[in-house]
Image: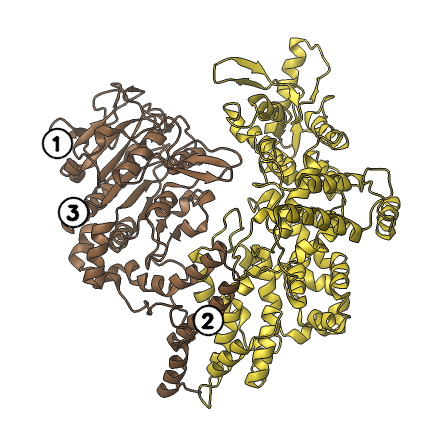
Amino acid sequence: MAARVLLVVAIALATSPCLGDETAGASPLSVPEVARRIDEMIQARLDERNIAASPRASDLNLLRRVTLDLAGRIPTRFEIEEYEAAPVETRYEQAVARLVESPDYAFHLRNELDALLLARKRNDDSWREYLLWATRQNRPWSDIFADLLLPEPEDKPRASAVAFLKERVREPEQMANDTAVLFFGVNIGCAQCHDHPLVADWQQKHFYGMMAFFNRTYKTKKETLAEKPDGQTRFKTVAGEEFDAPFMFLNGECVDEPLVTKSDEERKADLEEVKRQMNDAEAPAPLPPPFRPREELVRLALKADQDRNGFLARAIVNRTWARLLGYGFVEPLDQMHSENPPSHPELLQFLTQDLVAQGYDLRRLIHAIVLTEAYCRSTETYENRPFTELDSFAAGLTRPLSPWQVSLSLLVASQNPDWFAKPEVRTQWENKRGELERQSISLSREIELPGENFQVGVEEALLFSNHPRMQNDYLRDGGDKLFGKLKGLSAEAMIEEAFLVVFTRRPTEQERQFALDYLTATSESPPSVRQNLLWALLTSPEFRFNH
Amino acid sequence: MNHGFEKRMSRRALLQSTATAGILASDMTLLDVLQQRLLAEEVRQQSKRVILLWLAGGASQLETWDPKPGRPTGGPFRAISTSVPGIHISELLPRMAQRLGDTAIIRSLNTKVADHGTGATIMTTGRVPEPGIDFPDLGATVAHELGRVDSKVPHYVSMYTATEGRRKGGPGFLGSRVGPMFLTDSLMPANLQRPEIITEIDHQDRAQLRGFLAAEFAKRHASPAVNSHNSAYDRVRGLMSSESLFDVSREPQALRDKYGPTQFGEQCLVARRLVEAGVPFVKVARAWWDSHGQNFETHQELCADLDHVMSALLDDLAERGLLEQTLVVTLSEFGRTPQINGSLGRDHFASAWSCTLSGCGIRGGSVYGKTDEDGRKVIEDEIWAGHLFATIFRAIGIDWKKEYMYGARPVPITDFHCAPIDEVLA
């Protein structure tokens, strides 16, 4: 453990000059250096394609964007003040450096990984605790992958990583395909019934090869996972021929099971034991078989990354980039195959190799990406160019917030902003953040996980328009609430404060005038008009999206 | 403190001034769609819709549409003749027997999977579930094809039963824009009514203030997702006006009596009000047909309810001239075993079972497919879920060969190798 911490520190301090060699073994590039390399490669493509990039977004806009991406919530009033007080040249880098080390970072990455890996299919607190444990220590992605595929029942909190497979254990097809989609960026589901019609890489044997690694996995009566000592995966082609599926990784590398000859009695005893494990909660924990297919899969996947024909590192790089920029180098994210080349092959390769060489350090990857100019570009659509090609990364993309980003941001926005500045709140921020996290759960469950071609449904608009919790939770009049503060201010000050807290910016002249006219249309205004304005800010797309 | 009338008016005048003009159409909350003759007429002529009567748990084909009287598997009930010469159904459905002129019976479903979860998924999505892709259910597909983006009514209303547990369907990869508005115990969907703590004036002010801010943002951030956010909010006030559609007390007592006082009856009356106002898809689930024990008592009770309500619904739709635009489907996750078990029950059975299609686009009085004399297997015109779905699509004018794109993958709306059944189509 100590050695790992030292290693991370060493990486953070390393500022080796760029020697044009990004291979493993050379001293690692610094994070800003990685960011610079990314921008060079993006710029090279823009030059080739003769595309002009959008300008950098405004400072406050960037604070909001990066706080949502790293902390999973909008910035507090206090963070805005701190940011504006810092020197213009370095305030963004400083904010990023603070955020990647903040407790919020681990909470947010946990939430992102939870949505990616379990997609809310089950509510499992111990699984979420496992993920938080992993993100807090910046656990290498390769280790998280191994934890999920080889959960150790005796080793807390890693044991809780079992939820990933347990949710899918009824169908080996599901375990195989979801592992391929989520960890390797390939959807081989099509190859279940026939060779992929368009992609030579994906044949039935790839699907069943992957499935072979999971086919012996079953759930015991005690709700743990176990592997049967034997079992052959077979498949039938469209032509009706039957084949035995080898244990084959996606790059074609196979592993042979050591040949064991067993008597009929031994086989029968094996079967009986599996049956007992499935039906008897009192049975002693099953012994792991000598040959464990899932262990082989983890070994092959990591070896492939070392051999530079892997999938694990490449897929998480693509996913992380897509999460932060709104679009992947390869789209769709689960179609990383030879017929669907990346927009920036050299850049994807560079980041993949850096990730592997630096011990699958996700924080380093994320940190580097948010420092790039590409990440910082404005999302505003200008006169003559409403859209550029998405895969050029010439402009920022407006992205829907995730359910927990919405819910947490609503809590932050509706809290009395002075609360965040209190010294005791700041020193106990990790606990406070944990509280906000718990409070945010119930609303976040009502909001859809954004997927491809996300569209907001009318259910959400009805919820925000008519559910009493909007009024009771977010617009409530009380000393602990934003509205409690706003109602005591002059109309002008209320407008300034509300825009700054909710949108992380000041109102435009037109907005200021419009809001002022509304609030002061009559000499005496009921408090509800201020609530109405606040509601409109909170339900505006400017709040609902990251931009 | 109290909001004077003139004060309200000046604030409202501001919101309706140039700043917000064009953002919101005229306010729709006070509109009762059914009271607007012209609108109702337009809706009536244009769109097709579907009412799915979902017999949750698995209804027995032998006690409904495919009786086998006098056989060892037949059970105690007789078959009766119907308004269509040559067609016999169970005596438990006497009213439907007199109304088969608009209904086609399909007796040859072989859907293979007889567990509730997967069976329900197959029969609501029209195909076998696959890892890595979440297929939309029938309601979401119909909502996607027939729902209008600016509609003042919901696209898809689903009255499911708590007994079904989590198996209530959904929009899958089509996304929540075409997802169902769910109702379970209450006849009123969530969040359709203005909460009492907000006045009507404030509610309207909010929508208009939001409209102003949203338009400013959308000008600078044009994207389909941002637009969908605004169109969802733009639909709110209109949808709230559809609140009255869920209120059966607005129907004459005589008609309510025809549907009967049961929950299923009231829900079907709501379903009629909804399709009349242009809702493309309404599902009404009736539970719980899973008669592993006492199959015959269970069916005596549930079939009486089904017979009563379904015949009232078909009559009501026909009298209003709506049956030609409305397809009524009865369907389950599977049927029940011909074999009667030791508890006088019938178990899960997906190899030879029945469903019905009535009204829009259907050749009434027809029977498709045949099972053997004991109902153990299909002996003529076997079909799968995909054929049924293709038939439903064709009946309501949806191109059944259409494909959606899910990422890079084309997904046909009809399962592979399936086509509509011409014999039951008008």
Q: Colour of chain B?
A: brown
Q: Colour of chain A?
A: yellow
Residue tagged 3: B318
What residue appears at the point 18 percent right and 51 percent down from the top-left corner? B258
Would you place residue B346 above or below residue A264 in this image? below
- Quarter in which the C terminus of chain A is drawn: bottom right
Q: Amino acid at mark 2?
A: Phe
What is the number of the mark on residue B212? Answer: 2
At label 2, counting other C-alpha atoms closer than 10 Å, the crowd grade (few under 14, some 14-19, many 20 or more) is many
Residue tagged 1: B84
Of pointers 3 and 2, the one earlier in the residue sequence: 2
What residue appears at the point 71 percent right and 20 percent down from the top-left corner? A255
SS class, disc 1 = loop
Cα distance between the residues tagged 1 and 2? 61 Å
Is residue A124 something one can see in this rendering? no
At label 3, counting other C-alpha atoms closer than 10 Å, the crowd grade (few under 14, some 14-19, many 20 or more) is some
Percent coordinates x, y for residue A510 in the rendering: 52, 77
Left or right: residue B411 versus residue B310 is right
At label 1, counting other C-alpha atoms closer than 10 Å, the crowd grade (few under 14, some 14-19, many 20 or more) is some
Q: Chain of mark 3?
A: B
**Front label number (1 vs 2):** 2
Of pointers 1 and 3, the one earlier in the residue sequence: 1
The reply to the same-chain question for discs 3 and 2 is yes
Percent coordinates x, y for residue B325 in the rendering: 22, 46
Say if mark 1 contacts mark 3, CB within 8 Å: no
SS class, disc 2 = helix
Q: Chain of mark 2?
A: B
Would you place residue B408 above or below residue A425 in this image? above
- Quarter in which the N terminus of chain A is drawn: top right
